[in-house]
Amino acid sequence: MVSAAEQLISNLNFSAFSRAADLKKRIWFTLGALLIYRLGTYIPMPGIDAVALKQVFDVHSFGMLGMFNMFAGGAISRMAIFALGIMPYISASIIIQLMTSVFPTLEALKKEAEMGRKIINQYTRYATVLLAIIQAYGIAIGLESGANVVADPGWFFRFSAVVTLVGGTIFLMWLGEQITSRGIGNGISLIIFAGIVAGLPTAIFNMLELSSQGQLSPMIVVGIFILSVALIAIIVFFERAQRRILIQYPKRQLGNRMFQGDTSHLPLKLNTAGVIPPIFASSLLLLPTTVANFSQHLPDWAEGIVIALSHGHPVYMMLYAALMVFFCFFYTAIVFNPKDTAEQLKKHNGFVLGIRPGERTAEYIDYVLTRITVVGAVYILLVCLLPEFIVSATGISLGLGGTSLLIVVTVTLDTVAQIQGHLIAHQYEGLIRKSNLRGGRRNR
């Protein structure tokens, strides 16, 4: 017997989409907002020499600067008004999230309803502005240290650079919130998604051009495309994979009526940490290289560290893998608390079959979560390290690395799921209206 929800999903088609006027408005609003973001990545900061900037960026593009430039859609290489992108907001969100597990006051706010979430969101905005000011001032100082990059260095340029870059980040933060509330999908994630995807056509074109010039074998190009499709399939499978714990509820008596016990599931994602582990791991490993690029003379031991932490080096690979595994477990422990979940189940009289409610349930959930996190960590290692091995073996710069590919696929899945949810809700509303009309005609 096919359920009503499954029947609705199977009936989703373009005609249903064409009738969903609200959904079309949301999609057009999202596309318009992303177009504004892309236009902003081409508006340069005042007082910058573009030619000198390109020469400096080519030297420093192998560290954190290159990774952030990918997330910013190339805005850093052009030193546009959106050069900081949305990364200060992402960093502030992670910091506030970590602080909620350390400070009891923030943890109590997190457990509150809408008012508590509003206060935490406001703290996140304040932290975003503070981080953006620090990063913008650092960028201004770094630009002044470059040869002839800044036309008129000094405090006026630093002030204008900080105001411009911080203003761009605040605008993107507001734009992301508008996409989330008035558009479709998560606005912050879609802005990062748009920045990554924007550089994909250029990367594909460069690869095909190398193949046409004979510098790259056509078989390697075909192999890279096949590998990309395989990695996308793996990401889709593991991101949708869940471990469902069966939750049972006892019989209830309301008045003279006895209700049978109900059952539900506690879904645990295989990859609870999401894209945080590879982003944190790569940021930490690229930090020494970025600092070294701004130094003219390095001691021998520092040069050895920089070489060991370069892409493709065995030390870099091992540290990258170890840090990703660590952050998989660390961030999972931060975002998911088995004790709180067990308390909520006990509060609503829910229990796991054969497990005593309370502390025993928390231990069982933690045991299951640890086991599936091991599988999730192996999946993250496979997706993120395989492109690194290919780059180190062939010397070819892929269009999408493991981290960026993970972001693109997960954001696409979330957005498609929201679109599908809107279509299902629209069809339910249509069925309810039809049934009301039929009921009205029968009453007549």
Image: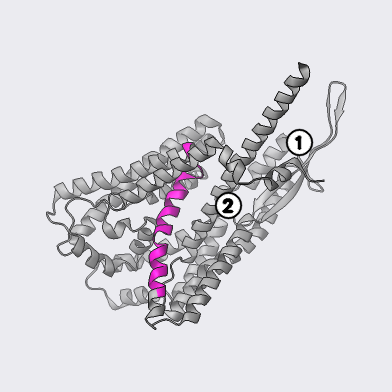
Instruction: Judge whether 310 appears above or below 46 on screen.
Output: below
Residue 153 visible from this viewpoint: yes
Q: Is residue 183 magenta?
A: yes
Residue type at mark 1? Asn
**Dominant secondary structure of the residues highlighted in magenta in the image:** helix
Image position of 14 (left or right of 146):
right
Label of residue 333 in the image: 2
Q: Outermost residue toward the left?
A: 152
Q: Which residues are magenta?
A: 182-208
Instruction: Judge whether 347 appears above or below 436 on screen.
Output: below
Residue type at mark 2? Ala
Check the picture and name the quadrant holding the C terminus: top right
Image position of 320 (left or right of 426):
left
**Residue placed most toward the observer, 5 or 53:** 5
Q: Look at mark 1 in the image and give the residue it sits on.
A: 349
Q: How far from the left and from the top, in percent, is residue 276?
A: 50, 56
